[in-house]
Image (cartoon, rainbow, N blue to C red):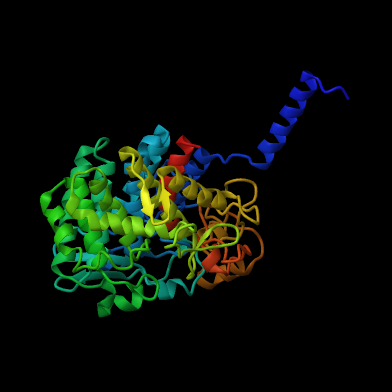
Amino acid sequence: MLFNKSNFLTISILLLLVASRTTAAHDYADALSKSILFFEGQRSGFLPSDQRQKWRANSGLSDGWTYNVDLTGGYYDAGDNIKFNFPMAFTTTMLSWSVIEFGDNMPPNELRNALVAIRWSTDYLLKTVSQPNRIFVQVGDPNSDHLCWERPEDMDTSRDVYAVDAPNPASDVAGETAAALAAASMAFRSSDPGYSETLLRNAVNAFQFADSYRGAYSDNANVKGAVCPFYCDFDGYQDELLWGAAWLRKATQDENFLNYIQSNGKTLGAEDNINEFGWENKHAGLNVLVSKEVLDGNVESLESYKTSAESFLCTLIPETSSSHIEYTPGGLIYRPGGSNLQHATSIAFLELVYANYLSRTSQTINCGNVQVSAQSLRERAKKQVDYILGDNPLGLSYMVGYGNNYPQRIHHRGSSLPSVNDHPQKIECHEGTIYFNSTNPNPNVHVGAIVGGPGEDDVYGDDRADFRKSEPTTYINAPFVGVLAYFAANP
């Protein structure tokens, strides 16, 4: 065949087409939309007319009656029907931080949806701190709930309310609630100034409770049996005090909160466990958050937080001498214990946030033998995102409803049981067992739900009973909202 310009052009186009199919770019905007939609499937309370996850209906409408208080609303944490306030508050903080840091990257309709998702939680959290010297920390008895496979709309298990009254301590939940309300106050500042002020005022009160009565909420005898081992505070309450103060400093610019972070850093262990971040341990996120003031050149006295933040980020880089994080053969961040994707989404979030901080000041991180740039952090975050969305050894999207190949049998009561629209009759506690044991796909596609994810060998069995891998949680999704907002705008 004669190799003329026409042939060359044709071959080039064909090669480009082949390449585009083998390395197809992800639709980050679609994933962003679905990651926010997920929260509508987790709602408790009276659902609005614009509810989009139509397989859900009203639930938990009497929550709080044992204390003669309205505790309706909020989110179920995962695939069960309990409102655990500790992880719910963390979810709210991360959704708010996603909007604060990446809201400008969101299409207007998705920014609105994100704010709606935040407010569904903050309206509930405000109720939990509405009484003086008391914080409500949980609604529902997980021990009875976990014996049933039941739709939230049919719940007949105990809706016990768990509260902590002063001088008993709840520094962890109160501190995280303060962080959530302070962060949300920033998210709503431009769109709803009045609501923003309400959130901030209550954040200050929640922090005062946390700081005045120091200790872990799970150490209270009336609470321990209901929160442990599910969301027991294993790592201590001190990080939530610093985390709450850091968010109040960011939201208010009040020098008192700056002084608190400066003077309490060492005594509250700011330099301990710096390589962890999640619903229980806030250290890495705290250090990244506080570092902004140092990188912007404003507060040199917080340098130790910046040092810890960069030390943590260096551990993520395999080429550095300080690397110690584990990756699966396919490249996913892995930590033992179940719900592993919570680590991948939260760490990717911190990488992108710190990359933004570095970019604004044209700085890099010195990881000993390697200089790490903002672009390098973004590339590392993108690998985690793309793995979750399907660039992995199984070719499986771990976000339900994204792509053509995703988990069908997630560990989630509402998703796996027929909806009240299709089956109006009540399904009793143990009547749901046949649906739990079924090998059929879940009848209700919980769009946007990110499951716990594969094991350290990249293997995922799509097994409803394997909750460590197949159960979605709100705190897996929350940081991913910000991550996807960034990549939707910067693919």
On the rendered image, what quadrant is the N terminus found in?
top right
Q: Position of residue 491 (x, y in %)?
A: 51, 37
Q: Position of residue 373 (x, y in %)?
A: 41, 45
Q: Which residue is pictured at 33% across the width and 65% down the height?
A: 281
Q: Which residue is pictured at 53% across the width and 50% down the height?
A: 383
- 460 or 19: nearer the eye? 19
Residue 318 in the figure: left or right of residue 184:
right
Q: Position of residue 471 (x, y in %)?
A: 51, 63
Query: Quick one: which residue is furthest to the front in this view?
Result: 369
Rendering quarter of residue 214 = bottom left
- 333 or 434: nearer the eye? 333
Residue 274 in the figure: left or right of residue 1:
left
Q: Which residue is pictured at 27% across the width and 41% down the height?
A: 188
Q: Which residue is pictured at 47% across the width and 49% down the height?
A: 381
Query: Quick one: which residue is furthest to the top in this view?
Result: 5
Up the image or down, 346 lies above or below 32; here it is below
Residue 36 seen anywhere in this rendered image of the structure? no
Query: Quick one: which residue is furthest to the right in this view?
Result: 1
Q: Position of residue 328 (x, y in %)?
A: 56, 62
- 120 or 407: nearer the eye? 407
